[in-house]
């Protein structure tokens, strides 16, 4: 895939690790405070730790969400355009238009699919050329047979006419 995909994935993973590390830090801090006797100071410290944890998670989570959305958009764009091209080519071939030129992109999966379509198109063109040559040959043979039939008919008529002109005793 595109290097930007791997970069986005790395940023997402680092963001998740940072969120987990902060969560563990604040969870440990809250656990330590909770194990102390309940005083106004410890309750205030726990509230402050919870508030800090919430803001830290928001500040780390929003960029991670933005990077995730950008990565999803990039993946959709990277796969969507080549797949749209494959669908267009398949539709034109299905309609009988074999003149479409196929260019495989730089994505391995779509390139493989486009190469398969290109091979199918080439085979269909070859088959259509063979059918055309066969049809042309049949047309030539049909004309030759018709010409031979006409010639045979003409000779038969000539012989019949000649036979009619012969005296009856020679027939």
Image (cartoon, grey):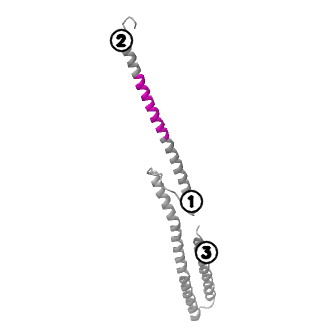
User: Which label belongs to residue 9?
Assistant: none
Say which of 77 and 11 sits in front.
77
Q: Which residue is mark 1?
A: 111
Label 3 near label 1: C-beta < 8 Å? Answer: no
Quadrant showing the C terminus: top left
In space, the residues marked 3 and 2 are separated at their CA atoms by: 106 Å
Does residue 42 show up magenta in the picture? no
User: Which label belongs to residue 165?
Assistant: 2
Whichever of labels 3 and 2 marks the residue nearer the N terminus, that label is: 3
Side (left or right) of 82 relative to 166: right
Quadrant showing the N terminus: bottom right
Residue at 50% of width from left, 44% of height from top?
A: 129
Residue at 55% of width from left, 89% of height from top?
A: 47
Mark 1 neighbour class, 10 Å CA radius: few under 14, some 14 to 19, many 20 or more? some
Side (left or right) of 132 relative to 30: left
Magenta span of residues: 133-153
Say which of 31 and 131 sits in front.
131
């Amino acid at each position: 895939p595109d290097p930007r995909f791997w970069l986005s994935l790395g940023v997402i993973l680092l963001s998740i690790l940072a969120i987990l590390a902060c969560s563990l830090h604040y969870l440990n801090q809250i656990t330590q405070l909770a194990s102390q006797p309940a005083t106004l100071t410890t309750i205030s410290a726990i509230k402050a730790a919870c508030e800090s944890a919430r803001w830290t998670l928001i500040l780390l989570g929003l960029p991670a969400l933005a990077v995730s959305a950008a990565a999803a958009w990039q993946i959709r764009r990277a796969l969507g355009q080549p797949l749209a091209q494959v669908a267009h080519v398949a539709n034109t071939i299905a309609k009988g238009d074999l003149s479409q030129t196929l260019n495989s992109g730089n994505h391995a999966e779509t390139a493989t699919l486009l190469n398969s379509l290109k091979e199918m198109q080439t085979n269909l063109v070859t088959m259509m050329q063979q059918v055309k040559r066969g049809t042309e040959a049949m047309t030539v043979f049909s004309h030759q047979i018709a010409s031979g039939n006409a010639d045979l008919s003409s000779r038969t008529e000539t012989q019949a006419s000649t036979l009619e002109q012969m005296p009856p005793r020679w027939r």
